[in-house]
Image: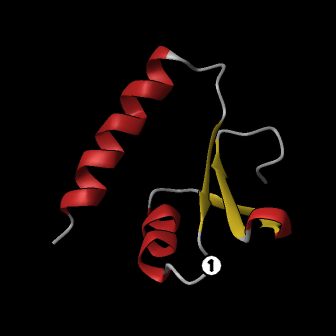
């Protein structure tokens, strides 16, 4: 339905406008395909896998985000 996308998109824009110096990172369970799909739709890029906590890392507006 796109509700989560719309809300998070507006919130992220607001946060980035207020805190442009900040990096936005998320950690998500590798099996949570719905959240991964949402993060990608929001423009987050895959930053790698954290084996210690069994999470995939995604980031937006990060220095290591290419």
Work out whether 16 lies above or below 47.
Answer: above
- The quarter in which the C terminus is drawn is bottom right
Locate residue 28, reporting x and y percent: 58, 65
Locate residue 16, reporting x and y percent: 49, 27
- Count of marks overlaid on the render: 1
Work out whether 14 lies above or below 10.
Answer: above
Q: Is residue 25 rendered to the left or right of residue 9?
A: right
Locate residue 57, reporting x and y percent: 70, 60
Q: Between residues 22 and 17, which one lies in front from this camera angle?
A: 22
Q: Is residue 9 rendered to the left or right of residue 48?
A: left
Number of residues whose C-alpha sits closer than 10 Å to that of mark 1, classed few (under 14), some (14–19) or many (20 or more):
few
Place residue 11 in its image quadrant: top left
The scheme the figure's colours follow is secondary structure
Residue at horizontal 46%, vertical 21%? 17
Q: Is residue 21 rendered to the left or right of residue 31?
A: right
Residue at horizontal 52%, vertical 66%? 40
Q: Residue furthest front?
A: 52
Residue at horizontal 66%, vertical 19%? 21
Could you say whether the residue bearing mark 1 is in a helix, strand or loop?
loop
- The quarter in which the N terminus is drawn is bottom left
Badge 1 is on which residue?
A: 30
Q: Is residue 30 rendered to the left or right of residue 5?
A: right
Locate residue 36, reporting x and y percent: 52, 72
Work out whether 53 lies above or below 18.
Answer: below
């Amino acid at each position: 339905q796109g509700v989560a996308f719309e809300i998070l998109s507006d919130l992220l824009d607001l946060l980035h406008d207020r805190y442009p110096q900040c990096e936005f990172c998320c950690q998500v369970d590798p099996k949570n395909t719905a959240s991964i799909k949402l993060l990608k739709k929001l423009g987050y890029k895959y930053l790698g896998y954290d084996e210690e906590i069994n999470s995939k890392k995604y980031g937006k507006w990060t220095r290591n985000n290419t």
